[in-house]
C-alpha cells in the first residue's frame, strides 16, 4: 500500500444485525468518515427537529456497505428499520473514526454536587453481541403489579420487542414536547402482547396500557430491556475525588460531535 494512502473505510460488526431477503442475519457494516455532506445533514433544521431521522440520514450517508448491500443499495429505509442498539453502535463508531475515540465527559456527583471531569474512550466501551442462535425479537417478563383492564382483570405477562429507528422517528415529536410521554409512545409501539388482551386491542390502547402501569412495573421493564438487549453499555461508574463517593451515570454525550 502506498505511504500516502489513508484508510477511509472502517468495518464494524453489528451487535444484532438485520435479516436480509434470504432470511440470513447480516451483521457486517462498513463506514466512512463524516465529511462536509454530513455537516450539512447535521445542520438541516428538518433533521434537528427529529433525532431519530437525523441518525437515519447520517448513517445512511456514511454507510458504504451494510451486509451484502453496496452503498447504492443502502437506503435510509433500511437504516430506519434497524434496531436502535445497532444504530447507536454505528453512531459511536462513526464518531470514533471521524474525530477519534477520546470523548471529554463531565459527571455531577449526586452526593456532593462536585463536577467530575474525565475522558472516555469510545472504543473501550463494552459491547454485548447477539449470538447467532439467539433471538432479539422478544423480551418476556411477568409484571409485579400488572395492568388492570376495564373488566377488572389484571394482566401481568408482557411481551415487548426491541425498538427500531422507525420507532425513534415516530415518537420524536412527543419526546420533544414531553420526554415521559414520548417514552410511553415508544414502549407502546414495542408492546406485542399483554396477558389475555386481544392483539388488536393492545394495538389500539397501547399508550394507555403503558401509561397506567405502576412505576415499579415500568422500572422492571427498563431493567429487563437493559439486561436482555445487546449493544453498547453506556452506563459508567464514576468515582468522585472530592467526597470519595462512587456513582453510576449514563455516558455524557454533550460533546459527542465536538472535535477534541
Image (cartoon, rainbow, N blue to C red):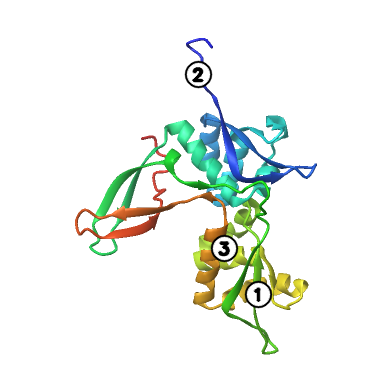
Image position of 4 with respect to 75: above or below: above
Q: Which of marks 3 and 2 is nearer the N terminus?
A: 2
Q: Distance between the residues labelled 3 and 2?
A: 43 Å
- Left or right, 6 with reference to 135: left
Q: In which quarter of the image is the C terminus?
A: top left
Q: Which mark is residue 141?
A: none
Residue at mark 1: 157
Image position of 251 with respect to 216: above or below: above
Image position of 89 with respect to 71: above or below: below
Residue at mark 2: 6
Q: Which residue is drawn at 71% across and 33% down?
A: 69
Q: How crowded is mark 2: few (under 14 residues within 10 Å), some or many (20 or more)?
A: few
Q: Can residue 43 be seen in this view?
A: no
Q: Quadrant of the N terminus?
A: top right
Residue at mark 3: 174
The answer to whether mark 3 and mark 2 are in CB contact below 8 A is no
Amino acid at each position: 500500500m502506498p505511504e500516502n494512502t489513508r484508510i477511509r473505510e472502517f468495518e464494524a460488526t453489528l451487535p444484532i444485525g438485520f435479516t436480509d431477503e434470504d432470511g440470513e442475519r447480516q451483521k457486517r457494516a462498513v463506514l466512512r468518515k463524516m465529511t462536509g455532506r454530513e455537516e450539512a445533514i447535521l445542520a438541516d433544521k428538518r433533521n434537528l427537529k427529529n433525532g431519530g431521522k437525523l441518525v437515519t440520514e447520517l448513517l445512511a450517508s456514511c454507510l458504504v456497505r451494510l451486509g451484502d448491500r453496496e452503498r447504492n443499495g443502502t437506503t435510509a429505509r433500511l437504516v430506519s428499520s434497524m434496531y436502535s442498539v445497532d444504530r447507536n453502535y454505528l453512531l459511536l463508531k462513526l464518531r470514533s473514526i471521524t474525530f477519534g475515540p477520546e470523548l471529554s465527559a463531565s459527571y455531577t456527583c449526586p452526593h456532593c454536587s462536585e463536577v467530575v471531569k474525565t475522558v472516555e474512550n469510545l472504543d473501550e466501551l463494552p459491547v454485548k453481541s447477539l449470538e447467532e442462535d439467539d433471538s432479539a425479537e422478544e423480551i418476556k417478563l411477568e409484571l409485579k403489579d400488572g395492568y388492570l383492564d376495564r373488566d377488572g382483570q389484571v394482566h401481568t405477562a408482557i411481551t415487548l420487542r426491541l425498538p427500531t429507528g422507525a420507532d425513534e422517528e415516530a415518537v420524536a415529536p412527543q419526546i420533544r414536547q414531553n420526554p415521559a410521554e414520548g417514552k410511553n409512545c415508544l414502549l407502546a409501539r414495542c408492546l406485542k402482547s399483554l396477558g389475555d388482551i386481544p392483539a388488536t386491542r393492545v394495538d389500539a390502547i397501547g399508550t394507555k396500557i403503558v401509561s397506567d402501569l405502576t412505576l415499579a412495573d415500568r422500572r422492571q421493564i427498563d431493567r429487563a430491556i437493559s439486561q436482555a438487549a445487546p449493544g453498547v453499555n453506556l452506563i459508567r461508574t464514576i468515582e468522585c475525588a472530592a467526597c470519595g463517593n462512587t456513582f453510576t451515570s449514563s455516558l455524557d454525550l454533550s460533546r459527542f460531535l465536538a472535535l477534541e
